[in-house]
Image: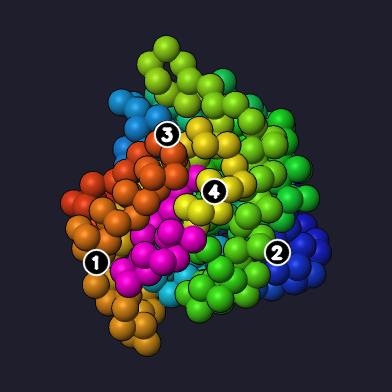
Amino acid sequence: MNGEYICNLCPRDCGALRGKTGGGFCKMPSTAMICRSALHFWEEPVISGTKGSGTVFFAGCVLRCVYCQNSEISRRPCGIAVTPWELAEKFKELEHMGAHNINLVSPTQYVRQIIEALKIYRPDIPIVYNCGGYEKTDTLQMLSGFVDIWLTDIKYGSNQKGLKYSGAPDYFDVAAKAAKKMKQLCPDDIFDKNGIMQKGVIIRHLILPGNTKNSIAVMDWIAQNLPHDTMLSLMSQYTPHGDVADFPELQRKITRRELNKVTEYMLSLGLTNGFVQELSSSGDDYIPEFTV
C-alpha cells in the first residue's frame, strides 16, 4: 500500500498519482503520515469517557477551512510516515493504554492504508471515523465493517458557505449525502454499561461567529432529513485561527447570544439528543501539541 496509486477517495476526484511525494488537492504521499498518537480527553463524553479516546491525528485534509485550528498539520505532509503494519501497532498501543476507542482524525486521504492496517490488527474496541463531512459515499461504503462510529461534521447549510470558508463548492450537497449514508451504515446508537458509545453516528456542528443563519439552516436540514434522535454535538469552541484576515466576521469568538440562539432553535425542532458545548471551551488550551 506504499506504492504509487491513482487517488479518487475524496469528492475532489483529483485522479492524482500518489507516491513517495504527494499529489492532488491534499498533497499527501501514498504512505500514511501521522502527527499525533495519544489518549485524548476532549471529545464528546460518550467518546472520551474517563480513560480517553485513542486518537491518531493524520497529516493532510480534503478541505481548506480558512479558520482551521490544526492548519500546521492539515496543509502539508508532516509528522512521521507509517506503513500499515506500523499503523496497526499504533492501534494496538492505544488499546493497551486503556483507550475506549481508536479515533481516526482527518482520515479520508488514507482510507486505503487504514483498511490495510485494520486487516492486520482489528482492536477489540470501537473504530471512530472522525471527519469533516466532505466524504464520497463510495469511500464510506469501503469502510463498512471496519468503522463502528461515524463522528462527522456538517459545517454549512449551503454550498455557498462551503466555497467561501472551506474551498469546497459542493460541500453541503456532499455532506448531506454522506450523513445519510452514515446513518444507513449504522442506524442505531449502541452504548456499553458505562455509557460509552460502541456503535453509532454523531453529527457535529461548529457555530461560526456572525453565522447563526448558517447554523439554523443546518439544524433545519437535520430535522427534515434524519431521525430526530440523531445524536448532535453543537460546538461553541470557535477561536480565530488560520487565514481569517480577509473574513472580519471570523476574527472573534462567538457570543453567548449566538450560542443561545442556535441552541434554542435546535431544541425547538425536537433535536434534543446530544451535547451543547460550554462557551468556555473556546481557546487554545484545547488544541493538542502535534508530536508523535
Position of 264 relative to 18 (above/below):
above
223 drawn magenta: no
Residue at numbered disc 3: 273
Q: Residue at x 51, y 73 (%)?
A: 161
Q: Residues within 10 Å of mark 3 (few under 14, many from 20)?
A: some
- Which amino acid is tagged 3? Asn
N-terminal of the pair, mark 2 or mark 1, is 2
Residue 194 located left or right of residue 144? left
Q: Residues within 10 Å of mark 2 (few under 14, many from 20)?
A: some
Residue 225 located left or right of residue 141? left
Mark linked to residue 11 = 2
Q: Residues within 10 Å of mark 4 (few under 14, many from 20)?
A: many
Viewer-nearest residue: 100 or 276: 276
Q: CA distance from mark 3 to mark 4?
A: 12 Å
N-terminal of the pair, mark 3 or mark 4, is 4
204 drawn magenta: yes
Q: Are marks 1 and 4 in contact (CB under 8 Å)?
A: no
Residue 248 located left or right of residue 122? left
Task: Report the span colored magenta.
Answer: 203-217
Q: Residue at x 38, y 79 (%)?
A: 243
Residue at numbered disc 1: 253
Could you tell me residue 175's position as x and y percent? 61, 57
Residue at numbered disc 4: 222
Q: Are marks 2 and 4 in contact (CB under 8 Å)?
A: no
